[in-house]
Each structure stands twice: as structure tokens, then as C-alpha cells.
Amino acid sequence: MIVDIINKKRKKEELTTRELETLFQGYQEGKVKDYQMSAFLMAICCQGMSEEETLDLTDIFLNSGKKLDLSDLKMKTVDKHSTGGVGDKTTLILGPIVASCHIPMVKMSGRGLGYTGGTIDKLESIPGFKIELTEKEIKAQAKAVGLIVTSQSEELVPLDKKVYALRDVTATTESIPLIASSIMSKKIASGADKIIIDIKIGTGALIKTEEEAEELSDLMIKIGEKYGSEVKTCFSNMDHPLGRTIGNKLEVIEAMAVLQNKEKGELRDHCLNLAAELIAMAKEESLEQAKKEAEEALTSGKAYQKFEEWIKAQHGDLTKLKITSKQYAIKATTSGTLTNIDGNALAKIALQLGAGRTTKGEKIDYNAGIALAKTIGSTVKENDILALLYTNKDISQLNLQNVFEIE
Ligand code: URA
């Protein structure tokens, strides 16, 4: 009985492969209802899962759809995943860097989860961008462009897509076994040989502590080993947003500025470091040499050219990428040094502006978001603009003063 399995997990008992299949495959087939799966996911969040259960769940996700076989490309493909952060537009920058170094990247991405943005939503904010590609289209684009970002279609890990959407709106995002199986099933299904996982830690991330990050890292490496993929993990801070913007169109525009060498700083450095790790793994060369190649691809403009080629291949029209919502300035009420920007609080505000979803399937306002005008460490004078808010919603009730710490 479904309810007995939910109850077993609620009591922190280990589930058999069969029991996990009953719940998750049943959910895929519609036999297990949203409310039952919500309760089950909450039990997993509160009581955890063993390594064995997590490996089983990854397998169930993986077998819910097809796997991509990229062996006819006769090249090692790479993939990157971030565990989710605020303002994290790394894929939009790293993908073109790596692909312009002749390493094919085939990536399946998700939509926004909780208060963290999703690459698919960001890409969909580009007018015309096609996010669902068939296997044939993926292979053709891998050969022609060397870079693809596609959503989890009905063919590839469809069960994760369904569960992910439910987790987003039931406060069940922050679970290490659920994150590990969700991410790794997509990575394995997209056929990558070498995978880098960027584990975000901090107030604006799904993972809050270094211990949790270690646990997630170990699990992901073990899952990779089981399926013959090389997995590397890196940890990065997410106490404050990555880069200057939060919100879909705003983040695409910022990523373009980095690729056009108009922006320096943490976001650029982070993308170069991750790109170098992937290049080193794929070409089996030193990290030092890979760093040089990544830097050259970016500064020479090769990476930006690859970005344009990729967006065009997926039917996106960058000439139509414009912010059309109203704009409001948030000003400093005191003078001093900007010592912190609360990423988590900003993400929640971005959600209220319309940049994310609060219910399953809700429509996003791609124009909505926040553009920071100051970085941590800046000197701020009273009345200086700290951020611009983009929204068509009423913002009279929003209070941003605690988001910025000025001392
Ligand atoms: N990204 C995913 O794909 N799944 C998660 O569970 C969290 C982040």
C-alpha cells in the first residue's frame, strides 16, 4: 500500500528497491497522486535516505526515459551542473568557453527550483529560444555547434521533471539524496563522459554547510562511478548572489557582457575556473594549460561567437532581448561600506517581483528581476542607488533595507 511505504519512510526505515519503484514509478504513471508524493518527499527530506536508496532512486529516474547515446560523436562530451544558486548564470558563460575549445557540451537543464533560478527559464527568456530538442536534433547540434542546452523532455528523465516541479512548490528542495539523484540521473542520461558539479554553499543555496556539501559530493562521485562517468566536484560560496543580476533576461544580458569582455570579477573568474577543470578533464592535460586555453577563448571573443552560434541554432533572437518592465531604484539610507548583500533575501524578493514561481507551472515574468549597482566592499553614500528592481507588480510593500548591510 502506498500509505504504508510513506509511513515507513516517515519512521526513518530503509526502503527496498521495489518500494521505491512503487512510489516513484506509480507517480510517473499517475497511480500515486501529487498529495501522496508531496508527503513522501517531505518524509525523505526529514528522514533522509541511505546510499543504497539514493542509488536506487537514481536508477529509477534514469530508467523513466531514454538515455542519449553520444558515442557516434567519437569525442568525449562534458557536462556541468550547479546545485542551484542565486544569480547563477555560469552555464551561459562556461558552455561557450568550453565548446569554443572544441569540447562538446550537451546539457540538460532544469527550471527554477524554489528561490534558485533555472538555466532553462533564463534561456527561454530569449525570444524564440527552443528548449525542447529531440534526440536527432541534439546529435545534429552537437556535431554542428558543439553546444546544446535542452530541457528534460518527455524522453529524457521525465520522472525527474515531474518530481522536480512538485518539489519546487512543496518545500522539499533541500534534501541531499533528492538533489544527488535528481542531478546525477540527468547527467548520466545526457551521456556525458566527464562531469563537473559546482556545489553551491550558503544562505542563497540549497546546501547550507560544508559538511552537507561533502556528503553530496561523495554521493555524486559514487553515482558517477556506478555508471562509468568521471565526476569532479567543486564548492563555491553562495551567501551573496553570483554577479550583478537576478532574474531571467537580466542574467542573460549579464552573461553576454562577460562573454564580450565588458565585465570582470567573481562571476568571470568562477566560469573560467570551472571551464578549465572541464577542459583539463576532457583533454587530459594540466589544469594550468587548460586555464590558459579557457582565458584565451574568452578574451579573443571566440567564446562569444560560440554563444551567438548556439543561441541561433536553438532559434533564439538576441536582437529582441530587451527589458520592458518598469524600473525602480533602491537607494542607500546611510553612508558607509557595503559589507554584505543577503542572497537569500534578494532571491525571495526576485520571486515577489515575478522572476520565479510560487506554484507549479506558474508563468514567469522574464523581465522581472534585480540588478545590483554596488558590490560588496564598495563605499556607499546616502542616496546612492544600491539596486534597480524590474517588475510590473506593485512594490510598495517591499522592504529591501535589511538586504544590504552598510557599516
Ligand atoms: N538541480 C537539480 O537538477 N535538481 C535538484 O534537486 C537541485 C538542483
Image (spheres, grey):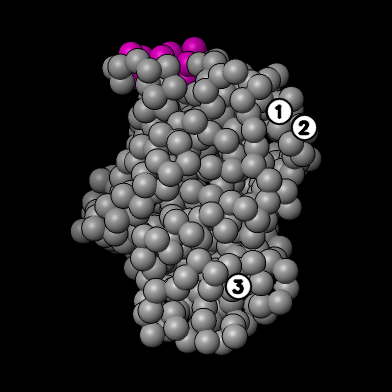
Q: Disc 3 or disc 1, which is closer to the eye?
A: 3
Residue segment shown in magenta: 289-300
x then y, percent, for residue 193: 49, 31
Can residue 391 be seen by looking at this rendering? no
Q: How many marks?
A: 3
- Of the image marks 3 and 1, the number of the one nearer the N terminus: 3
x then y, percent, for residue 173: 47, 66
Q: Of helix, strand and loop, which one carries label 2?
A: helix
Q: Residues within 10 Å of mark 1 (few under 14, many from 20)?
A: many
x then y, percent, for residue 240: 35, 53
Residue 30 vertical placement versus 249 (above, below): below
- Could you give the CA–CA distance between mark 2 and mark 1, rounded to whole angstroms? 5 Å
Nearer to the camera, 101 or 106: 106
On the picture, is 126 further left or further right than 385? right
Q: Of helix, strand and loop, which one carries label 3?
A: helix
x then y, percent, for residue 392: 67, 63
Q: Of helix, strand and loop, which one carries label 1?
A: helix
Q: Residue at x 62, y 53 (%)?
A: 63
Residue 127 is labelled as none
- Could you give the CA–CA distance between mark 3 and mark 2, rounded to whole angstroms? 32 Å
- What residue did someone put label 1 on? 139
Q: Residues within 10 Å of mark 3 (few under 14, many from 20)?
A: some
- What residue did someone put label 3 on? 22
Residue 298 colored in magenta in the image: yes
Q: Amino acid at mark 2?
A: Lys
